[in-house]
Image: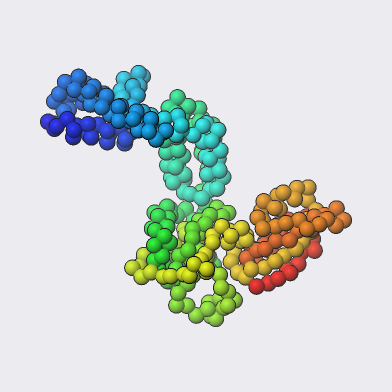
Amino acid sequence: MQIGKSNRVLFLYSRLMHGQMLRKDELAAEFGVSEKSIQRDLEAIRDFLDRRVAQEGFGSMLVYDYQERAYCLEQDNGMNLSNEEILAISKILLESRAFTRREMEDILDKLVVDCVPKENRRLVNDMLLNERHHYVELQHRRPFMDKLMPLSNAIRESRVIRIKYGKLKGKETVERRLEPLAILFSEYYFYLVGFIEGIDKEKAFENADDPFPTIYRIDRIEEMEILEERFQILYKNRFEEGEFRKRIQFMFGGKLRKVRFKYSGESVEAVLDRLPTARVIGEEDGAYVVEAEVFGKGIDMWVRSQGELISDYIVLKNG
């Protein structure tokens, strides 16, 4: 294949960026030039990458792999994650159980290949081998990654969406028009938070006056359409997902409530970490007195899960 030098360099650079190993003799035969010409092409790519690293402080380097006898790209060490960081991120991903087995395998493989220096990859893979082998998918086993970016774009562009959604109880499917506000992750699942358009709240909801958005599990969205129609929310009424996230448990929406209880466990830090709005207001009979602001009744589930460690649980404010 005879092409000009500039196009040839671009071909080589593209292949390197896609993770290919380049051998001079093979390239010379493919392009009908000498190995010296290919060497000059590679040096031009090396110079470009070196200048980029010098200017930006990070980037890729062209290196020669003596074992493979080929050229490849290697991330500058400043961009690589350490073995410890990769292990920590991978274990969090595995513990989350958020993805199907195939999705999880793909993500972990890309993390190791893209972020770990080549000489450390086998070590990191060996450390993860047992947990990867025993990974247990969630019961729904539905891939949903393809929905995340379209939903994110709809949120960013304030576009109305139409979804067909499988309800949690029974096999009923409902259609909704939503004003999407945020994507959250909690307790194994990704959720979409949004306001419903055109629904009879008196019939559909226990609390028709609830001013807060509704929550949907993304894996249960069976069909989705991003509409051209846009919605607008006043700045003063904008949805702040960080504040919402601090006040919700098990992704059960509902009224804003203020609760108080006594905690007699050994580590009150566990409570404060679980309920980011919680604060210790005193101690009574060897127990911590805790108050927190929360949305909905998810807090009731958590309180019951603590058994005798929590007592005197009361709702101070409901709505």
Q: Nearer the viewer, residue 256 or 167?
A: 256
In the picture as drawn, the residue positioned furthest to the left comes out as 2
Residue 93: x and y, percent? 52, 44
In the rendered image, is residue 308 in sight?
A: no
Residue 197: x and y, percent? 45, 74
In the rendered image, is residue 211 in sight?
A: yes
Q: Nearer the viewer, residue 168 or 256?
A: 256
What residue sits 55% from the left and 33% below the top?
84
Q: Nearer the viewer, residue 192 or 272?
A: 272
Name the quadrant of the C terminus. bottom right
What residue sits 49% from the left and 67% below the top?
235
Q: Which quadrant of the figure has residue 255?
A: bottom right
Residue 106 position (above or below residue 36): below
In the picture as drawn, the residue positioned furthest to the front comes out as 55
- Give the left or right position of residue 1, taking residue 107 as reference: left
Residue 35: x and y, percent? 20, 20
- Give the left or right position of residue 182, taking residue 22 as reference: right
What residue sits 51% from the left and 36% below the top?
86
- Give the left or right position of residue 45, taking residue 313 as reference: left
Q: Nearer the viewer, residue 166 or 146?
A: 146
Name the quadrant of the N terminus. top left
Q: Which quadrant of the figure has residue 281?
A: bottom right
Residue 90 position (above or below residue 71): below
- Give the left or right position of residue 239, taking residue 225 as reference: right
What residue sits 56% from the left and 70% below the top?
212
Q: Which quadrant of the figure has residue 299?
A: bottom right
